[in-house]
Each structure stands twice: as C-alpha cells, then as structure tokens.
Amino acid sequence: MNMRVDPADLKTRYDVQNESTKIALESTMLNPRFYTTDFDEMDRIDVTPVREEWDALIAQMKADPRRAHFKRTEDWDDIDIDAYPEELRKELVDFLISSLTAEFSGCVLYKEMKRRGSNPDICELFGYMSRDESRHASFINDALKDFGIGVNMGFLAKAKKYTYFKPKFIYYATYLSEKIGYARYITIYRHLERHPDKRIHPIFKWFKEWCNDEFSHGEAFALLMRADPKLLAGHNKLWIKFFLLAVFATMHVRDHARPEFHKAMGIDIDEYDREVFRITSEITRQVFPLELDLDNPALHERFSKMVRISNKIDEADRAGGLLGNLRKARWMGAAGLNFIALYLIPTKKNEIPQISRLEPVW
Ligand SMILES: [Fe+2]
Ligand SMILES: [Fe+2]
C-alpha cells in the first residue's frame, strides 16, 4: 500500500481528517443517520414466543465465530490507491466513509440499548451486536488510514444529530438495513470472486464473513418483530411498505452517485441493485406480510426517476442563491410526488410461513 508519510503533508492530512469527519457528520436525506428511541419501551420486549430460536441465535452470537476475522492478514493486497484517477479515489473514500458511518450508527444505537436496558435478553443481544458493529467500523477506519485519513468516531458519536424513531420504526428500518447490508456485501463479494482483477480495494475480500454478521443481526430483529406479531399486521403493513420503498430508493440513489467506483469494479449499478432488491425481498418474506412487486416495470421506472430528480436537486444545490433554492424546492416537491407514485404501486401479498435461519442461503 502506498502510504504518504511526508511530514510536509501533516497539515493537509489533519485537514483531510477533519473533512472526512465532516462528511460523516452531514445529515442529509441520503447519508446514514444516527438514531435514538424509546429505550424503556424496547426494554419491555418479551421474547418468550420465539424463545427456542432466540436462544439458538444468541448462542451463535456468544460463540463469536468471526472473532478473529477483522484483522489485516497477508490477504490484504498491496494496491497503489494513489495511482487511481481522482474521481475514483474520491468515490471509493466516500463509499468507505458512508459504510463506516452506517456501521458506527448501529454500534452507537445497540450500545445505548445495552447500557439503558435491564431486560437480560435485550442487553445480551445488543451487547453482541454493538461488539460486531464496533469491529466493522474500526476495520473500515483502519482501511481509511491508508488514504491518510480517518474518521474521529468519538467526536462523531457526540456531534452527529440523532433522529428519534419509535421502537417499531427502529425494527423496520434496522431490520431492513441489516438485511440489505447482507445482500449488498454478498453480491459485491461474489461479483469480485468472479472478477478478481476488478477488486479495487482489499477490504472486499473480507465481505463474505462480514455479511454473515449482518445476516444474523437481521435475524435478531426478525425475532423481535415476531415476538410481537401486531408489528407485522393491520395498519403497520402501511409502515412496512413505506420503509421498504424508502430503503430501496435511498440505496438506488446513493449507488448512482458513485458511477466511477462501480465502473472500476465492472458493476452495472442497475443490475447490481436489482439483484440486491431480489435477495432482500426474498429474505424479508420471513417476516413481512407483503413485498414490493419487483416484476412491475413501473417500480423500477420510478426508482430511476428518483435518481434523475436527485441529480437535479444536487445541481440546484450547487447553483445556490435564490434561484438555486427555488429550483431545489421544486425538485424536492417532485421527489415527494414520485415517492407517492411509488407508494401507490400495488405490493404482493406474502403468505409464506415465518422462519428464522442461523446461516444465509442466498
Ligand atoms: Fe456491520
Ligand atoms: Fe449489522
């Protein structure tokens, strides 16, 4: 790895570090967010209805099978990142910072649950999950050091704005982000396994084991929801649809913001996203009573439209001034209408029996 250690660069490196912490701090619609919730309500969860599966999952987490995984080994290739074109380098760093923020956001939320809780089941689960997310975030931060930058996580935890979500919204959003995280990591890993020459960073070699952590975190949320079946019925189905669309659309827009990064890996963003949607949708059948109709072309057209609108919002943002702000407001309105149109597309009913898995099969 080509590392810049020229003392003359120190001042720049300090600025770059501040800059990357700033990127991680930004709270926009698309950046990974930090959440807080009603911890007392969460502490009252009773997992008795799913006790058997719960105990099996907790035993697996306690055994900590990936304890030694998040360390650099001789598999960490010596790639000269400085030789990359500037745009690719920028998008790769942006991908790493955004992944780190998402991992760390989970770490902070889970740790807080463990700290505030008194329910032994809940405290044990969130203790293991914050342990995993902390490892993931630190591993990415370590990778960022090769670029001469790093995110100050302690500062981030204090300074980032927290969004309040009711516990049930935490379940839907976090369950989905864990499962979509699994689907993304495994899809990238498999693609690069077929095209090793396109592996632009050694961290992708770690994704296979890594995604198994995210898979089991998702399983834990599936069990929490199944322990309280009203979360998966009645008017809550409307919320489930909302979160499915919001999470899928956000991912699609975010991925399209990194064209060079995907091109360098030989990944067609639309194809990749469709595969991730497919895997996530199949997995979420384990709990959600409905799924998005991925065979409906209108759904994909609307997701693409969201990308075009998001580009317009960015353009207006860059233009600035009164005119820029007016244009931005107009395109934000268009995004809202497009989301409503997405919401009006019928979903498919899912009546497959509810199941939990210790190992992914996708
Ligand atoms: Fe993670
Ligand atoms: Fe996770």
Image: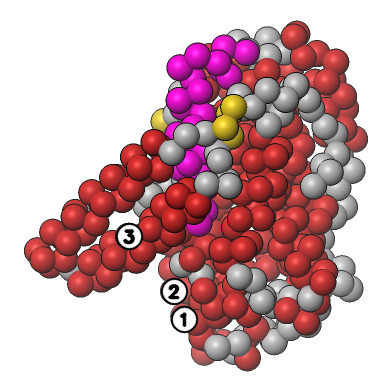
The reply to whether the residue tagged 1 has its Cβ within 8 angstroms of ligand 1 is no
Q: Position of residue 230 (x, y in %)?
A: 57, 12
- The quadrant of the picture occupied by the N terminus is bottom right
Q: In the rendered image, which quarter is residue 304 located in?
A: bottom left
Mark 2 lies on residue:
15
Q: Quadrant of residue 122?
A: top right
Mark 1 and mark 3 residues within 8 Å of each other at the beta carbon: no
Q: Amino acid at mark 3?
A: Ile
Residues marked 1 and 2 touching at CB (< 8 Å): yes
Q: Which residues are magenta?
A: 229-252
Q: Main secondary structure of the magenta part?
A: helix
Q: Which one is earlier in the sequence, the residue at label 3 or at label 2?
A: 2
Residue at figure coordinates x 62%, y 63% from the top left: 271
Decide which of 119, 14 is in the foreground and name it.
119
Q: Which residue is mark 1?
A: 12
CA separation in Å, label 1 and label 3: 35 Å
Q: CA distance from mark 1 to mark 2?
A: 5 Å
Check disc 3 and report the residue beneath it.
309
Instruction: Name the amino acid type tagged 2.
Output: Asp
